[in-house]
Amino acid sequence: MQQYWWQSTVVYQVYPRSFNDTNRDGIGDLPGIIEKLDYLQELGIGAIWLSPVYQSPNEDNGYDISDYQAVMAEFGDMADLERLIAEAKQRGIRIIMDLVVNHTSDEHGWFVEARQSKANPYRDYYVWADPAADGGVPNQLQSTFSGSAWQYDDTSQQYYLHLFSQKQPDLNWQNPQMRQAIYDMMNFWIDKGIGGFRLDVIDLIGKQPAQGITGNGPELHHYLQEMNQATFGNRDLLTVGETWGATPAIAKLYSAPERHELSMVFQFEHVGLDEQPGKSKWDLQALRISELKRVFAKWQTELGDQGWNSLFWNNHDLPRIISRWGNDGQYRVKSGKMLAILLHMLKGTPYIYQGEEIGMTNRVVHDISEVADVESRRMYAERLANGYSPADILHSINVKGRDNARTPMQWDATEQAGFTTGQPWLAVNPNYATINVAAALVDPDSLFYTYQKLIRLRQNNPIMVWGSFELLATAESVFAYKRRYQNETWLVVNNFSNEPQQIDLPAEKVETVIIQNDETELTSLANLQLTPWQSFVVKVAESDDN
Ligand code: TEU
Ligand code: CA
């Protein structure tokens, strides 16, 4: 496969609202990100995925945009954003903008126009439908944020589609004028020197609502090839699509270079392994490590060199991984290191979500009034109406709610974790006194330095970027695999549990210890007793059965 910068870089996701506040209003801002660029350079990342900073009424924290070419006042202004792009570039860091073009805000000028009348020139920028014969919703399409995906509009006595909140009307990608307007907007940002785009729910833009089709619609890839030609194609930019419905075969359609669509996609198969099949993320079930191994092995091998993987445990929609699948008590740092080593030793582009590098955890709420996220609040209302107990619903929110990822970044042990000297828009996790950047930086054994080392290893070892993958047969809770490249073999071993585990690899001749999360002596791997959450990577001698 052709070589691109984004195959050997590591991306850091910033959720601006919760990253760093510089003007005491309790809301993170662009000058706050600029202030921390030296810290991110120290970590070693090569790009920042910036969650939306565009003008928005914040129904969904910026994923409801009212002006694509204006910066949200709370975050700063266009000069601040241009300064961020320039200051980041000076430190070898590219800025990846979040492109939210499946829908706009209902306060976007296009929609304000469109709902004026059926004859309005912007009407067809959105998806409208007449009521069903019974005067009700056109069909049973549901919103991800609970309830019908159709909202009635009195003015024109038609329904408009919103796959997310009713303040996020879906754009009609079948309209070529609308598509061209989006491409012009994308080129506006490309001309500002950004490093690429993260494309929000991009697998939905080929929807055919009348046929009940939302994801992977027939025109989807045609639109992406058109978008590629009209905007970022041949501009050496990173483009990553958020595609909840992708399989390896579909991911290849998106990321095979000769198809001229995207660099890679975020696929979420591993993220669904602790929810009851066929139900929602709120219907919890325990993770089975064998399932996680199966899914990772599939994606590591089936994309081969026809596509490219993204690697992530966290983002602004997911609970904190150490609380979810690690141990955020006794083994917070050790399990955090195991999770980091396991993920970063895989083939693909790793993404670190703000706070992951210092081991931030989920927070616990005791009442719905403490919950800010529109998705959780609407689910709470819907389930309460369906007879669920508040305690059960709150338990699901504490385990899976998106606010877990959105508590303010913990910079130090001063008041409000050094995030703000005002009142934070969302409460700081009370464990900030021990879990914070300042404490991590003065502790050579902290999780921060494990992430820093993994990033440096990826920059200096092509085996991490290009090596093949082979899952090894082990005990259920042991996740071990090999990477091979040219005549080099690395063995990666992880104990994914609170209990000691056995692994027996007598034939492996350890040549070099690459990284490990404890002091275990690793000369022989015969009948090795792994300590809880133990993780190590060793270079082993190449032997013919190897
Ligand atoms: O997310 C798509 C999406 O379906 C998730 O929002 C949803 O929360 C799911 O249940 C994940 O757990 C994207 C953005 O990442 C998200 O923040 C936005 O809310 C959403 O699209 C709409 O723009
Ligand atoms: Ca602020």
Image (cartoon, rainbow, N blue to C red):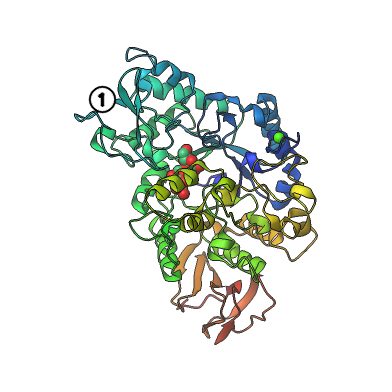
Front position in the image: 77 or 56 = 56
Quarter occupied by residue 421: top right
Q: Position of residue 259 (x, y in %)?
A: 38, 40
Residue 200 visible in the shown view: no
Q: Is mark 1 within 8 Å of ligand 1?
A: no
How many numbered discs? 1
Q: Position of residue 268 (x, y in %)?
A: 44, 53
Q: As displayed, is residue 61 above or below residue 299?
A: above
Q: Residue furthest left?
A: 133
Quarter occupied by residue 442: bottom right
Residue 384 visible in the shown view: yes
Q: As displayed, is residue 354 above or below residue 499?
A: above
Q: As displayed, is residue 406 above or below residue 500?
A: above
Front position in the image: 529 or 211 = 211
> Disc 1 residue type?
Asp
Residue in the image at 47% along x and 78% along y:
544
Front position in the image: 289 or 24 = 24
Residue in the image at 47% along x and 76% along y:
546
Q: Position of residue 470 (x, y in %)?
A: 45, 68
Q: As displayed, is residue 523 above or below residue 344?
A: below
Q: Position of residue 246 (x, y in %)?
A: 37, 49
Left or right: 289 as drawn, with respect to 138: right
Q: Residues within 10 Å of mark 1 (few under 14, many from 20)?
A: some
Q: Which residue is mark 1?
A: 130
Left or right: 377 as drawn, with respect to 77: left
Q: Secondary structure at mark 1?
A: loop
